[in-house]
Image (spheres, rainbow, N blue to C red):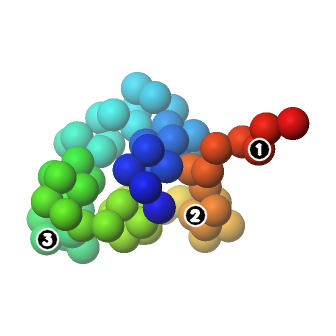
């Protein structure tokens, strides 16, 4: 997962406004007591941050995998 895919996944799951809030303000113990933004900036792979964020926010497993990818062009 690239950073752009992480951003798209967060926006798709939480909406743009809440997505910005949750990545900026929610401190996640699984990320070393950092926010998602801090973890990504600190070099944690975006996929690991995405999964930790999903765990913290209770996102169902079926909505965690394969998200963030751009829509295929027709």
Q: Position of residue 50 (x, y in %)?
A: 41, 61
Q: Is residue 22 above or below residue 39?
A: above
Instruction: State yes or no: discs 1 and 2 in contact (Cβ < 8 Å).
Output: no
| Lateral position of residue 66 relative to residue 18, left or right | right
Q: Residue at x 30, y 35 (%)?
A: 21
Q: Position of residue 8 (x, y in %)?
A: 51, 41
Q: Sequence-wise, which precedes: disc 2 or disc 3?
A: 3
Residue occupied by mark 2: 64
Q: Is residue 68 above or below residue 45?
A: above
The image quadrant that residue 71 belongs to is top right
- The image quadrant where one finds the C terminus is top right
Residue occupied by mark 1: 72
Disc 1 on helix, strand or loop? loop
What distance separates the C-alpha of mark 1 from that of mark 2? 19 Å
Outermost residue to the front: 74
| Lateral position of residue 20 relative to residue 39, left or right | right
Q: Mark on residue 32?
A: 3
């Amino acid at each position: 997962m690239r950073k752009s895919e992480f951003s798209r996944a967060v926006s798709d799951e939480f909406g743009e406004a809440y997505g910005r809030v949750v990545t900026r303000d929610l401190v996640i113990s699984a990320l070393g007591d950092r926010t998602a933004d801090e973890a990504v900036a600190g070099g944690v792979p975006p996929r690991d941050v995405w999964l930790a964020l999903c765990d913290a926010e209770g996102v169902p497993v079926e909505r965690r995998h394969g998200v963030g990818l751009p829509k295929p062009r027709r």
